[in-house]
Structure formats: C-alpha cells, structure tokens
Image (cartoon, rainbow, N blue to C red):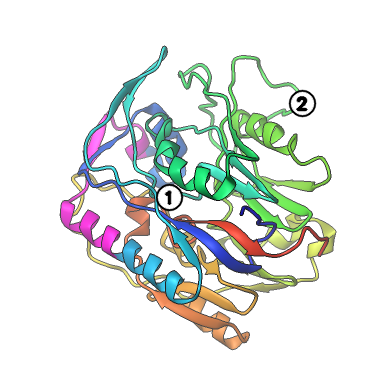
Amino acid sequence: MINSNTSFGKLKQVVVGRELQLEKRLSDITFKQFYREALDEKIYETPFDEYHVSMELIDQRNEQLNDLANTLSSLGVTVHRPDPLTKIVPFTTPSFKSEVSSASNVRDLTLVYQNKIIETPTFVRNRYYENTLLYDVYNKTSGGKNWFRAPLTELTEDTIDLGHWGDTRDYTNIPNNYVMAIDGAQFLRIGKDVIVNINSYNQWLGYEWIKSFFPDTSFHVLHVADNHIDGCIVCLKPGVFLVDPKYSNIRDLLPSKFRNWTYLYPKDLTANIDVTGMTDIDIRLASSRGMDVNVLSIDENTVVVNKRAYGVKEVLEKNGFDIVEVELDHGEIFAGGIHCSTLDLEREDEYLYY
C-alpha cells in the first residue's frame, strides 16, 4: 500500500538505500553543477571526470545502512531495500554516455505523496537509470497502480541551467531549450501544503510537472538553498520545525500560516571525523550541519537521529521528543543523511490542512 501525506505520520513502510559498492565515482558537468555549492568554485572549475572513494569507507557506509534498516524493522516498520549494484553498468543515450549509480539516497529520485509514486526527472546523468534498482519494491508495494515516471530528458549542456542557484530568474519566461529536472527531496509534505525549494529553470519545469498531479494541494515555492530542502528544514509534527541555523530567516519566507509555529535550532555541528585518505580528491557533497537535521520521524514523538548530531539530539530532548540513535557517518562524502537514505512509502496520516 502506498500512502504518505506528511513527514511525521506513523511510519509503516520505508525503503533504505544501498551505497554503490565500487570505488569509482563519475563527475561530469551535471554532477558538478548539481553539487556546485558544496564543491565550491575551486573544485567546480577543476577538470576531473571521476574520483574514487575507498572501499573501507564504502563498506562502513553499507554496514551502517544495514544497521539503519534493522533498527527501523525493530521499531515495527516494514523495510524494503533496492537491488545492490556491485559492478560497472555502462549505458548510452542519444545524447550522452554514463554508468548506472546505485540507489543510495533513495529520497532523491522519487516523490511519494498521497497514494502515488512519482519518479522525478534527474539532473545528474549517472542517476538516469538508478531507480530501476527499486522497481521490484515499487511493483510489489504499488501493485502497478499510481506509479509514474518522468520523461527521460537529454541532459546536454544546453538543456541544463548552468547559472548559480542564487541568481535571479524569470520563471514566467523560461527559454525552450531547458528540460525538467528536480528531486523528490526538494518537497516538504505537510498534508495539503507542500513547500518546495526551486532555484533553477530545470527545477521549475520539474515542479510544474509534479504539481499537475495534485490539483487540490497548495504548493509554496521557496528559494533558500541550491536544491534539497531536507538539509534546511524538517517538519517534526504539526506546529514544530527543525531548522539548520544557517537558515534563520526561513520563518519569514514561509506562508503566514506557518510563521507562528515553533522553530527548533540545534547549536553544535557534528563532530569532525577523520577521513584522510578515504577519497582521492578533497571533495564534500553536503554540509555537516545539513546532515545533522536530516532526520527521519517514526511518528510525531519519535525521531531517528545520527548519534553524532549532538546539537540536534539536545534540542529534541529539551522539547520532549523521543530519540532513536543510529550511526550514519560521512554523509558529506555520500551526499546523504538519514532522511536522504530513506523513502517512506506508507504512513498512517491524512491529507489535511494543518
């Protein structure tokens, strides 16, 4: 059964990702543009087509993902896993060549909302066929109903918006050369309200396509980060947000109905973990702070948090939440925290205005 209207209703079914079991990682122009903010301009402008992550780090990540899956199972949640990817799988489209990536950050390329599975149009070439590793899960849980895949797009340099995410754009007059590209992790579901972060022509086109499935939903567009919203703000329950302090002004950007809610700001960053020699280039794809607030709610009172997210644990405990600790390290390298690495398929919740 597919049903999920919020990020906080009682979790019944979830997917937990698997990290790519190969050291080689691709870094074409779509990859660099997608992670541009995290890479910084120096790395962004460096000519490299691939980089490598040590098998030691990959094995640790997969072991921790397995532990996350086991923890969720112990809490009574039905856990699904994508097929593993243990060998290079090259592919060719009419416009580019690449290699299939594993379904690690399963939140990214799928939006589950109401009773629908929507495979979102990817921006990164090697993720083009990533969701095929989830098709057994989607087929089993959906019964083939209300499962949609975005059109496959060209992803050539003239079809993607290469401007900086902070640049001003006119979304009422988008040039015809751009294609849709947006991630499921850019949508924050709060019943009949959905907050979505948009900062490129590609994202706007993808947003318009997804919005067309839900004519009765109120969508609210923000411009606060380069792509994903779940490293900025998370809705823990009606009336309460968890927010990265970097986005201290986000209250003023949200619809007025949310401005009187409680905003929880953690104090401390994740403890630094030495990863010297784990990658062959000094690359980080996400921020420590963003990975700290990247939590997963089991229900309105229980939150799965990274063991080393000390500031998040402190602020949640002070506000009466029950915490389930797990270890999921190196989210900066693998571009995903707990929320990114999971995809809720079924929650006990309703399509309501909060």
Where residue 105 is drawn, which disc sits there?
Answer: 1
- Give the structural element (helix, strand or loop) at label 1: loop
Residue 60 location, quadrant? bottom left
Q: Quadrant of the C terminus?
A: bottom right
Residue 208 location, quadrant? top right
Highlighted range, magenta:
42-63
Residue at x-position 83% and y-position 61%: 353
Q: Amino acid at mark 2?
A: Thr
| Residue 315 visible in rendering | yes
Dot 2 surroundings within 10 Å: few (below 14), some, or many (20 or more)? few
| Residue 248 visible in rendering | no
Residue at x-position 80% and y-position 47%: 217
- Give the structural element (helix, strand or loop) at label 2: loop
Dot 1 surroundings within 10 Å: few (below 14), some, or many (20 or more)? many
Q: Of the two numbered discs 2 and 1 on the same chain, state the one appearing first in sequence.
A: 1
User: In the visual, does 325 lie left or right of 294?
Assistant: left
Rendered view: 77 above or below 33: below
Q: Position of residue 36 (x, y in %)?
A: 44, 39
Where residue 172 is drawn, which disc sits there?
Answer: 2
Q: Position of residue 222 (x, y in %)?
A: 69, 47
Residue at x-position 52% and y-position 21%: 153
Q: Position of residue 295 (x, y in %)?
A: 51, 66
Rendered view: 352 above or below 94: below
Q: Nearer the viewer, residue 144 or 62?
A: 144
Q: Amino acid at mark 1?
A: Asn
Residue 309 location, quadrant? bottom left
Q: Is residue 52 magenta?
A: yes
Check whether the beta carbons of the residues at disc 2 and disc 1 lie within 8 A of each other.
no
Q: Quadrant of the N terminus?
A: bottom right
